[in-house]
């Protein structure tokens, strides 16, 4: 399989800010970022491959534990897991296709984003060729094309003899999700009209999503999984969700509330400045978030 050329972070971030700009409007009030594995799809694409045609579940679980304890970096352990694959891409994908289950309401939510010109971006520590193939298959190529994927690229040999990640960032994470969201926010601000500050929404399921969630104004955490548990344990404002229908309902509520209020008094007018102020005065290790009580209550109900 040919290796895709990875665009520079700055150029890709600019693309994220402009998704849905076909009509010529530069104003972007809401931009969505979502984790992939465990969020859009219930299973982890990498785990499906490693457990079935790679190092096996037992070794993968040991490597996951070493990442959690800090014994090995995410990048180092991941390279071993991806390196354990020796199967052609198409064969590996057939296994994933049978094992993966998409959120039942994601297709409708994605169509909602397209109809309302809300940029939707996947942000993942996985491999872009895999994620794109999965989305093309489950959504169709036309709908999949509306989703930007911010992830690591990969070099995958045609015969499957080598699966090698091409990391977005030269650090122990391989992909610094927080940096990717920061870049997209900076570019989005430049495209907004009348000084509007974009509202960044992040959707996730695991603690590994926290670096990106720190950069968001609104955080949706899949109910019952580790991200929600962590938010509850550490008193981090968030809106739990069961399916993407919950997220769609809340985003629509926020959009309508903002439209009904006069400039300067709308939801976004008070939402973003506070989030930006928090980021200026907070430490790098803290997890910022500002979400209205009504947003959390609305999804819980």
Image (spheres, rainbow, N blue to C red):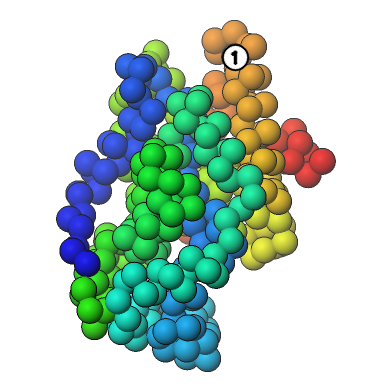
- Vertical arrangement, residue 20 with respect to residue 99, above or below: above
Viewer-proximal residue, 1 or 40? 1
Would residue 273 be found to the left or right of residue 253 on screen?
A: left
The count of marks equals: 1
Q: In the rendering, at what x and y percent does residue 131 appear?
A: 40, 58
In what quadrant of the picture does the C terminus appear? top right
Q: Position of residue 187 (x, y in %)?
A: 31, 33
| Residue that protrudes farthest toward the top in the picture | 262
Residue 300, percent across and down? 78, 44
Q: Quadrant of the N terminus?
A: bottom left
The residue depicted at 39 percent of the width and 39 percent of the height is 142
Residue at point 50%, 26% (across, down): 115
Which is nearer the eye, 58 or 205?
A: 58
* Rendered position, 138 above or below 156: above
Q: Is 185 situated left or right of 300 in this image?
A: left
Please tell me whether residue 217 is drawn above or below residue 73 in the rendered image.
above
Residue 53 visible (yes or no): yes
Vertical placement of 148 versus 249: above or below?
A: below
Crowd rating for badge 1 (residues with CA inside 10 Å; few <14, some 14–19, many 20+): few
Q: Residue at x 63, y 27 (%)?
A: 252
Q: Along the horizontal axis of the image, is 53 left or right of 231?
A: left
> In terms of depth relative to the viewer, which is nearer, 140 or 146?
140
Residue 204: quarter of image: bottom right
On the question of residue 237 being in view, the answer is no
Residue 70 figure quarter: bottom left
To which residue does mark 1 refer?
Answer: 259
Q: Residue at x 40, y 51 (%)?
A: 136
**Image spot of residue 118 (x, y percent):** 47, 30
Check disc 1 and report its element: helix, strand or loop: helix
Specify the farthest residue to the right: 301
Q: Is residue 220 left or right of residue 153?
A: right
């Amino acid at each position: 399989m040919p290796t895709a050329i990875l665009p520079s972070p700055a150029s890709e971030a600019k693309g994220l800010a402009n998704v849905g700009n076909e009509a010529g409007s530069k104003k972007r009030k809401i931009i969505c970022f979502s984790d992939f594995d465990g969020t859009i799809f219930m299973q982890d694409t990498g785990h499906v491959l490693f457990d079935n045609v790679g190092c096996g579940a037992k070794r993968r679980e040991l490597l996951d534990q070493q990442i959690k304890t800090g014994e090995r970096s995410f990048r180092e352990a991941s390279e071993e897991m991806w390196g354990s694959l020796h199967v052609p891409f198409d064969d590996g994908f057939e296994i994933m296709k049978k094992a993966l289950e998409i959120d039942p309401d994601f297709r409708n939510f994605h169509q909602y984003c397209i109809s309302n010109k809300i940029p939707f971006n996947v942000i993942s520590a996985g491999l872009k060729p895999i994620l794109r193939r999965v989305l093309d298959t489950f959504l169709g190529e036309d709908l999949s094309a509306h989703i930007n994927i911010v992830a690591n690229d990969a070099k995958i040999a045609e015969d499957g003899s080598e699966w090698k990640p091409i990391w977005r960032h030269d650090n122990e994470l391989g992909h610094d999700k927080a940096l990717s969201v920061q870049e997209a926010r900076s570019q989005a601000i430049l495209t907004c009209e009348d000084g509007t500050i974009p509202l960044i929404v992040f959707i996730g399921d695991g603690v590994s999503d926290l670096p990106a969630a720190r950069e968001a104004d609104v955080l949706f955490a899949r109910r019952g999984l580790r991200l929600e548990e962590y938010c509850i344990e550490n008193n981090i404002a968030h809106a739990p969700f069961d399916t993407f229908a919950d997220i769609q309902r809340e985003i629509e509520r926020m959009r309508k509330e903002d439209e009904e209020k006069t400039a300067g008094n709308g939801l976004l007018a008070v939402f973003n400045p506070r989030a930006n102020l928090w980021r200026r005065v907070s430490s790098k290790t803290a997890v910022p978030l500002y979400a209205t009580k009504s947003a959390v209550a609305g999804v819980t109900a």
